[in-house]
Image: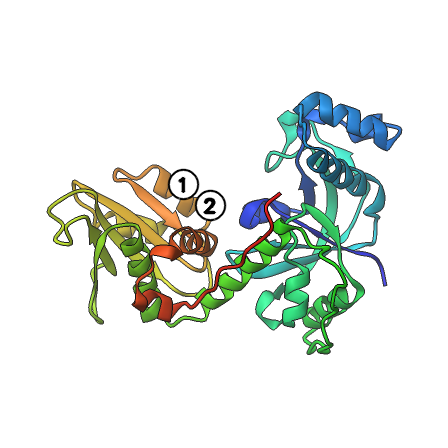
Amino acid sequence: MANGWMIRAGRGGKLIEDFESGYISIGWNQIGDLNQFKSVDEIRAAYIDCFRDPKPSRVANAVAMLRKFRDEVLKGDTVISYSSERREYLVGEVNGPYQYVPEDQQIGGHSHVRAVKWIGVVSRDVLPISTRNSLGSTLTLFSLSDSALKDIMAALHGKTAILTEPEIEDDLSETKDQVVSQAHELIKDKILALQPEEMEELVAVILRAMGYKTKVSPRGPDRGVDVQASPDGLGLTQPRIKVEVKHRSGSMGSQAIRSFVGVLRNGDTGLYVSTGGFSKEARYEAERATFPVTLIDTDDLADLIVAHYDNFDLEGRALLPLIRVYWPAE
């Protein structure tokens, strides 16, 4: 079996649509063409010169990513990338050597690229929990374990993955960032398991934890507004927030955003929550809207929950039970 690699398409997979055009990429463009460097020491010196990064661990991490992307990822290797909005892993085969793309020819803003032939997608939900956890590293690029790669390829071909006991580490080899990333994904799993009505309540809980008073629309036609929030709870004081909540698979398009903007009035601020994410066109539509509109995807929801969970009321904690995890200070 060829080697397998996981590569991040930006936070939350924001570059996944660019990747789908047939490539993978990493950042650190300022270093220039990696082919000009004959050794790891030269890459390290160039990185330090470009970024003036004083933290040794960050320098070592960046240099390792650049070296692996240029030298260790090989033609024929399996590569996956994750879209958190769609909860899917894009699966493909590396189809060419490392290339440096000048700024005026970039797609997605990265200069360090490799061609990829994509062969399919795998839903995160069909993978064993141990495999999901192994894919939770925050590293830009990392190798897949044999068991994770087998599970992914089995799912790609419609087979049930063989459940094995997760490996138990003898030491604290995972970094704090990796643990936080895994927790983030597990919280998203809990969010996506909620019913549509529970999702509306969750959004209201978050807004209450942020200091607003809320009103959830009763079941039935809501005229494009599922939750309303304001400092006084009556909408007489600003900000007056109107929220549309869509809890379904598949990203929301520009027409949905235009329809939502149509229900906003002077003094309103719009929040559009979609657990299926948003298309590029939808994000552009929100940016050009005549009223302030913020788009919230599942990653944003998980971040808001963690940031404000201390202020969740009893209803909110019952809806989404979480526990605090402590980590030694550096």
**Nearest the eye: 314 or 154:** 314
Under mark 2, the amino acid is: Lys
Say whether residue 225 is visible: no
- Residue 271: which disc? none
Label 1: how many Cα within 10 Å (few below 14, some 14–19, many 20+): few
- Left or right of residue 215: residue 312: right
Residue located at (48% from left, 64% from top): 323
According to the picture, the residue beneath numbered tag 2 turns out to be 280
Residue closer to the observer: 255 or 318? 318
- Identify the residue shown where x is 65% and y is 72%: 128
Query: Residue sitting at 63 percent across and 32 percent down?
Result: 106
Q: Report the label total.
A: 2
Identify the coloring.
Answer: rainbow
Query: How far apart are labels 2 and 1 at the CA level?
Result: 6 Å
How many residues crowd mark 2 within 10 Å: few (<14), some (14–19), many (20+)?
some
Q: Is residue 184 visible?
A: yes
The residue that disc 1 covers is 284
